[in-house]
Image: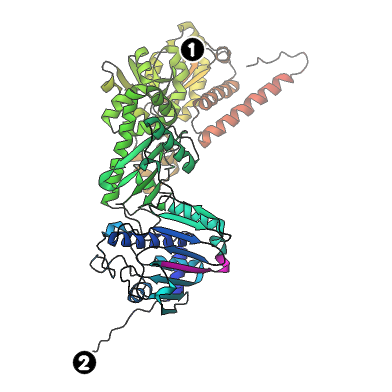
Amino acid sequence: MPTSESAHTFQVDLRGLVDLLSHHLYSSPRVYLRELLQNAVDAITARQAAAPGSPATITVRTGETLTVTDTGIGLTEADVHRFLATIGRSSKRSADGSLDGSGLDAARGDFIGQFGIGLLACFVVADEITVLSRSAADPTAPAVEWRGHSDGRYTIRTLPASAVPEPGTTVRLTPRADNAEWTTPQQVVSLARHYGGLLRYEVTVVGPHGETHQVNETPPWEQTHRSPLARREAMAAYGRHLFDFIPLDSIELDLPAAGLRGVAYVLPTAMSPAQRAGHRVHLKGMLLTDQAPELLPEWAFFVRCVVDTTSLRPTASREALYEDGTLSAVRDALGERIRDWLTGLAASDPSLLHRFIDTHHLAVKALARYDDELLRIVLPWLPFETTDGNVTLEEFARAHPTVLVTRSVEEFRQVAPIASAAGLGVVNGGYTYDRDLVHRLPEIRPGTAVTDLDPATVTAHLDAVDPSAELRAAAFLAVARETISVHDCDVVLRDFQPVTAPALLLDNREARHERTRSSLAADSDGLWADILGSLREETPRAQLVLNHLNPLVRQAITIAERGLAVTTAEALYGQALLLSRRPLRASESALLNRAFIGLLTHAMHTGTAAPGSEPRKEL
């Protein structure tokens, strides 16, 4: 049986398409004005290419209806059939990428619009759109009126040339009640300034009573200033107006190859690396987005940018940047510009560098970790938490030729008071990037030794107690070791400063991991227990170091009653745990509760002894 084939055309449900645009492509109905301004700018650009010096104005009128009038290239009746009645077809391109319909010799990159669906965004706020246009490309062509409805109907009629005295286009919207707030006079002025503030052509909003608002201005980087200081002040004032903060400094951005100019403003307060700043990106003057974190490298989270570009590509919604090779190259070049500013501060403005590092040291550390030149410049200036306080590595290394660095914040907090009293130089390497940077200090300062802190290093700097004192404490230490051994911890007696510290818990991450593995293995069975068992490592046990110089410990080691000795050992271990400031396991929390109740019970029994009986010795 012979097969047959017939051709068909896709049918478009305009209401469904408008719903798709409003709920999924565009983030808000407010984009309708951006699309109208964009079409007007492109129409003027096309006319300027054919007839330089032609009028170049855009007028937005508010009231019961909203109109946008431009002095652009205009449309003929044939253009209206091709472009307004065909969804997805842009008057700025043909199938081969050249201009379609007008025959003008303007470069495709001169236009803002690309996708041919911008006018549909107006159906988000209106049920009816009227386009009245007269072509500048064909002076003999009559004016034409296109009237479209959100249900897909449209009409076209020709008008005498006198109906439209000058070439150009007027788009009229009749606002729909459910979205009328987007077409109020105040909202229209706000949206026009938001989207069109940097447009090259004059944009004016006329209110219902004839009041006018000039919405666009020349950005400060394109203005001529009387002095470099005046230029800096103008840049700072512009950033303060845009972002509502006084910048620490302003960095001019100029990439001629990418057609990009603008300013990066250094934030005056610290910002988390996880909160990447949103940047304002204008495309040929039209605001594309004010939330473009992808414009700069991740490490540059300490600046906010405003830029105008001609080369970056927008996504279909025109609310974000399209990730391609051009954006990647621009991102790298802008990162290099910010890096150059930072490295130049050391020579040009050390006081500003100090203020910047005080505020944004985390960002500098992130960059210096991978940039050798920047590392050499800024590492001596960077503050670190040490046993000498928050000081620079340069200052710290002068006092401590051997620098010890911890792997975690908890380890540093455990040993800091003891190490400081013993004269050890310890840096807290638990914060992001710090440990890696400290280990690179010998590259900048030859002769300085850097090594990871080991608990044995601290133990070696603690003084051994007198043998007779060790002998007197033997009974208590035996009970304490037996009690604390269930926590994979040994107990030793030493003399160390400060006297106020009764006990020190020396532990490391590997030992804690091994205890966690052992605990999981004990609670598991079958294959999982075998796997955990195979991962067993021989790691040093933690040490509870009792300070023989501390009055509390001196009293504790004289306890002869086993029950009280057990409770006291658990209490000392619990106190050392709390001083280490690391998260407690369930068994450790139970130990603290048990020790507290035991000591409280002992105190109550001692306080209520029978009359005439000898009171029990208190701890």
Q: What residue is pinned by disc 2?
A: 2
On the image, the x and y values in percent for residue 42 come to 35, 61
* Res 231 → quadrant: top left
Instruction: Tell which of 311 and 561 is nearer to you.
Output: 311
Q: Identify residue type, mark 2.
A: Pro
Q: Residue sitting at 46 percent across and 23 percent down?
A: 414
Q: Mark 1 or mark 2: which comes first in sequence?
A: 2
Query: What span is in magenta?
Result: 169-179
Q: Nearer the viewer, mark 1 or mark 2?
A: 2
Mark 2: few/some/many CA within 10 Å (<14, 14-19, 20+): few
Q: What residue is pinned by disc 1?
A: 497
Is residue 566 a member of the stretch shown in magenta? no
Residue 78 visible at all: yes
* Res 153 → quadrant: bottom left
Q: Is residue 157 left or right of residue 139?
A: right
Q: Residue sitting at 36 percent across and 36 percent down?
A: 251
Q: Main secondary structure of the magenta part?
A: strand
Instruction: Tell which of 121 and 475 is nearer to you.
Output: 121
Q: Identify residue type, mark 1.
A: Gln
* Res 603 → quadrant: top right
Q: Residue sitting at 55 percent across and 24 percent down?
A: 575
